[in-house]
Image (cartoon, rainbow, N blue to C red):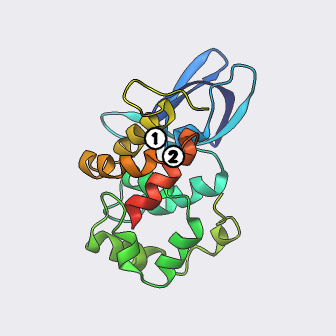
Amino acid sequence: MYEFMDGKVVEVTPAYIVLLVNGIGYLIYTADPYRFEVDQDRTVRVYIYQAVSDSAMLLYGFYESADKKLFEKLINVSGIGPKSALAILAGKDRGGLISAINNKDVKFLTRFPGVGKKTAQQIILDLQGKMADLIQNAAVETETQSDEGQSVELKDALSALKALGYPAKQVMAIAPELAKKDGLTTDEYLSLGLKLLMH
């Protein structure tokens, strides 16, 4: 199993990044690809979880080791797969998530794509009181316009929201609100979009 990889980000897409390590490009799924930037001159560390099944071997990457630990806790819950876990992590509100679990806030948890009431209750049952090691890490951590009036950054953020599992109809419904904010980075648009979808 991998713990982390040090390499150079050579591609960023709405669902994954490609990390170049010693001449090999690794496709790594991540909750927030736009937190990483394509930079051939800078080496970054990506914390890795390797998922092996009969049909595939997939890599999931995280900016911080605490996110990897939280991901591992989530996918051990019955009903939570890697995609749902990434969608939960994309919210970035670690404190809110941990608080919701400890306070049995089913409503908060069901706002995530792929998480119904039954799964939310299972998350609480399995993880309540078991997040203390993550609490200390629970802080929330340019503008070329396209011909449709949406910036490239906004388009990428909308694509990332769809890749996380949010229905296209919901994503497009918040697009006008996001478009009112000029000059945000893709990561900032994504963060704001997640807040709007969670309300």
Q: CA distance from mark 2 to mark 1?
A: 6 Å
- In contact (CB < 8 Å): disc 2 and disc 1: yes
Q: Is residue 149 above or below residue 95?
A: above
* Residue that sits furthest to the top in the current view: 23
Q: Residue 149 falls in which quadrant of the image? A: top left
x, y (%) of residue 148? 36, 29
Pointer 2 local density, CA inside 10 Å: few below 14, some 14–19, many at least 20:
many
Q: Identify the residue at horizontal 31%, vertical 64% (top origin).
A: 115
Q: Identify the residue at horizontal 75%, vertical 20% (top origin).
A: 41
Residue on which disc 1 sits: 157
Q: Is residue 102 above or below residue 183?
A: below
Q: Is residue 14 visible?
A: no
x, y (%) of residue 170? 28, 52
Q: Is residue 59 above or below residue 180?
A: above
Residue on which disc 2 sits: 189
**Amino acid type at image mark 2:** Tyr
**Amino acid type at image mark 1:** Ala
Q: Say what secondary structure mark 1 lies in.
A: helix
* Residue that sits furthest to the left in the current view: 169
Q: Is residue 142 visible?
A: yes
Tell me which label, 2 or 1, sits earlier in the chain: 1
Q: Is residue 154 left or right of residue 83?
A: right
Q: Residue 46 falls in which quadrant of the image? A: top right
Q: Say what secondary structure mark 2 lies in.
A: helix
x, y (%) of residue 157? 45, 40
Q: Identify the residue at horizontal 68%, vertical 24% (top origin).
A: 39
Q: Identify the residue at horizontal 44%, vertical 42% (top origin).
A: 51
Q: Is residue 137 left or right of residue 59?
A: right
Q: Nearer the viewer, residue 58 or 118?
A: 118
